[in-house]
Amino acid sequence: MKIDRHDMPEQDAAARAANFGEVNLGFSEQLALLEARRCIQCKEPKCVQGCPVMVNIPRFLEFVVDGDLPSAARSLFGDNALPAVTGRVCPQETQCECQCVRGVKGKPVAIGYLERFVADWARAHAGVVPIEPRAATGRKVAVVGAGPAGLTAAGELVKLGHDVTIYEALHKPGGVLVYGIPEFRLPKEIVDSEVERLVAAGVKIECNVVVGRTYTLPELRESFDAIFIANGAGLPVFMNVPGENFKGVYSANEYLTRVNLMEAYAENADTPVLRAKRVAVVGGGNVAMDAVRTAKRLGAERAMIVYRRTLAEMPARLEEVHHAMAEGVEFETLIAPLEVLGDDKKWVSGMKCQRMELGEPDASGRRSPKPVPGSEFVLDCDAVVVSIGTRANPLLTATCPDLKLNKWGNIDTDDAGMTSIPGIFAGGDIVRGAATVILAMGDGKRAAKAMDTYLMGTQNG
Amino acid sequence: MHLITAKAQLSPNVTRLDVEAPRIAKIRQPGQFVIVRKAEGCERIPLTIADADPEKGTITLVIQAVGKSTRELVALETGDTIRDISGPLGHPTEMISSGRAVCVGGGVGTAVVHPMAQGLFRNGAEVISVIGGRSKEWVIFEDELSRLGKVVVCTDDGSYGRKGFVTDATKEILDAGGVDIVYAVGPVPMMRAVANLTRPYGIKTIVSLNPVMVDGTGMCGGCRVDVGGSTLFACVDGPEFDGHLVDFDLLADRLGTYRDFEEKANQCCSDGECRIGRG
Ligand SMILES: Cc1cc2nc3c(=O)[nH]c(=O)nc-3n(C[C@H](O)[C@H](O)[C@H](O)COP(=O)(O)OP(=O)(O)OC[C@H]3O[C@@H](n4cnc5c(N)ncnc54)[C@H](O)[C@@H]3O)c2cc1C
Ligand SMILES: Cc1cc2nc3c(=O)[nH]c(=O)nc-3n(C[C@H](O)[C@H](O)[C@H](O)COP(=O)(O)OP(=O)(O)OC[C@H]3O[C@@H](n4cnc5c(N)ncnc54)[C@H](O)[C@@H]3O)c2cc1C
Ligand code: SF4
Ligand code: SF4
Ligand code: FES
């Protein structure tokens, strides 16, 4: 009998567009069992090849089918430290699920939903799966940045018996998971419980330490045997158009940080955020989707995506685009901003835009947008959120001129994650440019392994 | 957690707090600031490191109570704690090591000028400070600055020092000649006035900008300012810039972004103040 892929139960679109509660509600045990049964247990599972950290998907799914959830959890956590996170935010449609053989004639197994199910089950039933450290090695390691790359590396390193200290610039660990990705997509308590798990295993986390200012990298190098740099790609890029500094123009980073980390979604929060009526979000990635859906939830009558290409080229996760549409987000595609307009008090009053058309595919195979002459018009809006990407923040690297960077300012590493300075490793967005949570975690895991080899080598030698 | 080791009222609305932050006390340089979050749920606000005692491991914050967050901070007492302090942030002040520097401070800006004057003095420059306030009781840091050089005090009502604005006194010093550089920190209109004053003299003028900030690490871009036609982030590219290149109108405008919110918050916290007053 052919069973169709099971849909994720979700909050009603009209209701959720007005609250910050999680949109996806999660599979029930019964749904999970039915969906896991759709996996045909391939001998050479393609899905695993599609996963950047090679989660052994058929293995944990088989445990789900058997109803042995503790074993499913052990199997999953063994491959992936943050399955409750990745199950929710991985772009599965271009990774594990797009390779699944069930997707050839029909729909792929809902690997992400099942991953989330097992991880949530483990948190609810078994408590967090504790990390069991190896005997102490006496080696000291510093991790810079408590985003997914840093947290994963710390977990692996403490497991290997090293003495790990994470330095985090903000007052709360989690990186983009706490300041960027909104509560309605990734509840903060999931990140909090992962952080607790690390602390319980002996990882020290010092917040409010800005490496490059509070300590320089060379200073840290003196007191630690190895360092893992995972400070992300947190420098917002602006459009460089007139009017961009008017009141009501935000970077997505600022907008989302105010709402998420500083909790401005609550009416009486100390940190304010503008609750504009017509919000134009420029960009088409995950970050833009998060910003526009946040605007909707903050009460915007019109929450609009302004994107230069078409829906087909949008880099955002498919599920986010669908969710946004169901919530009433408007998609203004093939449009490029030319200027932000302001009133006499320099509040945003609109955005002058230009229509675009797609030209021939470029070297990367993407059809690049070209302006349509004479198509200028004014988009009515009273806030603009710029979400066209981020660059490497030079704050840390500037204090360590020996560290080799590429032409974009990202840190150069070898395949194992070691930088041009022996003993200093790096991973995540600071190496790759803005990428994904799972790639950042993969880097953390790989670098931890290489650091262990490095550390144990220097001890013997 | 950072313990408050001393507190003093410097003027009717300016309070000095000495706070434990040993690492920052040890390495901070003039011109740098910290981001402070009083307690869970509070706003992150930038404050200049007005002074530091590396031996005791304390930094001095001088806070003007203007809104909810600053009021809550000045309501703390010796023995209380501040949850988060991150720093030192921003670039250190660009210094001269010989010659004559005029340091102009208006209101709480005087506390920001103080570490600059200290640095200049240690570097071997001659320091003349021009400081102002509404009236006598609003003048701060006079004693500290007079240890570093000559101090000219100006009050709006003439109740202390000379009557008039800091710009008038500064102009006389410029006219007397020999000034190599001017530092100005205070309300936006005052910094703009000083920059306009020094421009025809062609004397380099450094101002310390105070846009709204969130993270202080270059991540949000909320602190962007226009300097010489380029957009810069005050927290990482500044906070001090060439006053002749700064777009002060834009700065003043952007500072008004949350005025409605602040007014609402202020009403709540003045209720709070009433309760403190009664208790
Ligand atoms: C809004 C948003 C939505 C996204 N949605 C998705 C999604 O759905 N799926 C997906 O896979 N990816 C998504 N991404 C991308 C993903 O979040 C990133 O690729 C990932 O977080 C990178 O991890 P990281 O550990 O390298 O860096 P980050 O998560 O950026 O963490 C870096 C940490 O380092 C700290 N830090 C920075 N500088 C310093 C310093 N000098 N000293 C000390 N600490 C410092 C920062 O405060 C931060 O906590 C999204 C990104 C954003 C912004
Ligand atoms: C680098 C830097 C250093 C600073 N150093 C000091 C210092 O040493 N002592 C000190 O008292 N203040 C300093 N400030 C200003 C201080 O951060 C603000 O006064 C504070 O954030 C206001 O918060 P609030 O909630 O109390 O007031 P709000 O209710 O937020 O604001 C009240 C009023 O202050 C204005 N305002 C808001 N933010 C700022 C700001 N960043 N700067 C100036 N005015 C603002 C508002 O427009 C409003 O009119 C500094 C600011 C910066 C950027
Ligand atoms: S970690 Fe991401 S890519 Fe890998 S199996 Fe899980 S959801 Fe798929
Ligand atoms: S490819 Fe699909 S069907 Fe095959 S093992 Fe992976 S999830 Fe199961
Ligand atoms: S305060 Fe966020 S970039 Fe300056």
Image (spheres, rainbow, N blue to C red):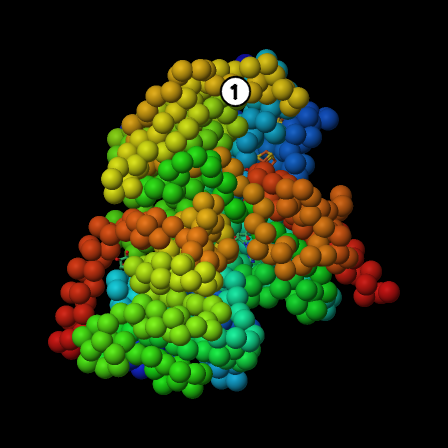
**A321 with respect to A106 (left or right):** left
Q: Subunit of mark 1?
A: A
| Residue B151 makes an appearance in the image | yes
Question: Measured along the vertical axis of the image, is residue B101 above or below residue A240?
Answer: below
Q: Is mark 1 within 8 Å of ligand 1?
A: no
> Residue B25 versus residue B167: which sits nearer the camera?
B167
- Residue type (three-letter) at the residue carrying disc 1: Pro
**Picture coordinates of residue B190, whole percent (x, y):** 31, 63
Residue in the picture at 62% in, 64% down: A216
Residue in the picture at 28% in, 40% down: A347
> Residue A257 versus residue A198: which sits nearer the camera?
A257
**Picture coordinates of residue B25, whole percent (x, y):** 50, 76
**A185 with respect to A447 (left or right):** left
* Residue at the extreme front: B176
Query: Quadrant of the rendered structure where residue A205 is?
Result: bottom right
Which quadrant does the N terminus of chain B fall into?
bottom left
Using a 10 Å C-alpha cutoff, classify the residue at mark 1 as few (fewer than 14 neighbours), some (14 to 19) or many (20 or more).
some
Query: Quadrant of the rendered structure where residue A340 is?
Result: top left
Question: Measured along the vertical axis of the image, is residue A267 above or below residue A356?
Answer: below
* Residue at the extreme right: A461
**A66 with respect to B140 (left or right):** right
Q: What element carries label 1?
A: strand
**Picture coordinates of residue A44, whole percent (x, y):** 73, 26
Which quadrant does the C terminus of chain B fall into?
bottom left
Query: Quadrant of the rendered structure where residue A342 is?
Result: top left
Residue in the picture at 50% in, 25% down: A314
**Picture coordinates of residue A456, whole percent (x, y):** 79, 61
Q: How many marks?
A: 1
Q: State the residue position of label 1.
A: A369
| Residue B107 makes an appearance in the image | no
